[in-house]
Amino acid sequence: MENKKIPNDRLKISKFKLDSLLDVTLSINANLPTEALLSKYESILRENLGIGKILIFKRSETWECLMNGGFPKSFEKINVEERLLGFDDITYVSSDMDFEGVDIIVPVFNNNVHLAFLFIGDIEEEGEGMSPVLKHLNFIQTISSIIIVAIENIRLHKESLRQVAMKKELELAARMQKMLIPDNSQMPRNPLIIVNGFYHPHYEVGGDYYDCIKLSETKTGFCIADVSGKGISAAILMSNFQASLRALLTAEIDLELLVNKLNSIVVSNAAGEKFITFFVARYDHKNKILEYVNAAHNAPVFYNTSSGDVKHFEACCVGIGMLDEIPVVKKVEIPVKGYTKIVCYTDGLSELKDDTGKDIGTGVIIRYISNMKPVEENIQAMIEFLGIPDNSNPYLFDDVSIIAADLR
């Protein structure tokens, strides 16, 4: 009778292990949530193997306590990097290891990298003092690995879905942002003013913006702006800024008043977290006067083809949204005598590097516009030389936006 009992016990144990593995596998295939898998796992260890306490540390972005059944809360704060990464095998905890209440530490690997650590405590003992858990540690390690890898795959799948959703949102935001920037076919093209723009986003969405608006039969307004920072928040602020600008910029409004009104709007919307560098100009075709305000933006380049004179329209005041109130806003008026070109740009262009690693600044702009060719041809030749359209420039780390005009 005794000889038959041993094989029957072994058969029973083997059946338990196979049934447990099958149950867990079917649960995983049924896409049960993490909570349900952990509940099933805990039931197997507690009810069938007599384990009193279970704690799991799992690696994801950082190490986290995935489950704590019976251990003190203080255990959840253990520094895994410092205290556990040295455990590569199943380890029986001794009194000098400073893991009070832990009997066994079981490491779990995925692709030869630590994925989790299992703490086991309060294990039941048989009459002769031998715990059944000790007989089944390899099974415990196997089923722990299956469960924890499955939970990690659930996390990665959710993260993948989140990334896909975010990518779609960014693509939609990018399309919406491009709609805010006028196409060259919408720009003024007449004997007195021809305006062209170039927009090359480095990220899906960003904070660059330029615009050109026909204000009257004799006046045209154009601008360029750049929000501090990148991403969705910058794009949203710029979208709001564009709407505000188009509502406020008229043929009659004083440019100082325009800038102050825009500043109040940005301060209210951005709550001091972001600001906008901004250049706005208005050209009177009839009187040949260009007036502008530069609010901390990169200085546009102004080139007179007759005299060969080059001017930089330096900043007249601080950026929009930097201060609750701008102390001084200075408008500048420039007479336009003969064929003149103006090029406005964001720092994505001026901060490109040359062969020595220095910012190219405005030297390359001046070099390419110092001729009688239309500024549209100048800009096209310049961006091709800089390797911008095909992203071949290794220093292209930001959006590049340009708006340029031929004035006569």
Image: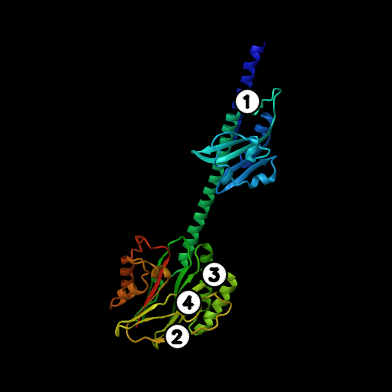
Q: Residues within 10 Å of mark 2 (few under 14, many from 20)?
A: some
Q: Three-letter amino acid code at disc 4?
A: Ala
Mark pair 1, 2: CA separation: 87 Å
Mark pair 1, 4: CA separation: 74 Å
Sequence-wise, the earlier of marks 1 and 2 is 1
Picture quarter containing residue 289? bottom left
Q: Three-letter amino acid code at disc 3?
A: Lys
3 vs 2, front mark: 3
Image side of residue 246 versus residue 335, left or right: right
Image side of residue 237 versus residue 333, left or right: right
Q: Three-letter amino acid code at disc 1?
A: Phe
Residue at image mark 3: 274
Q: Residues within 10 Å of mark 4 (few under 14, many from 20)?
A: some
Residue at image mark 1: 16
Residue at image mark 2: 332
Mark pair 3, 1: CA separation: 62 Å
Sequence-wise, the earlier of marks 3 and 2 is 3
Q: Which mark is residue 296?
A: 4
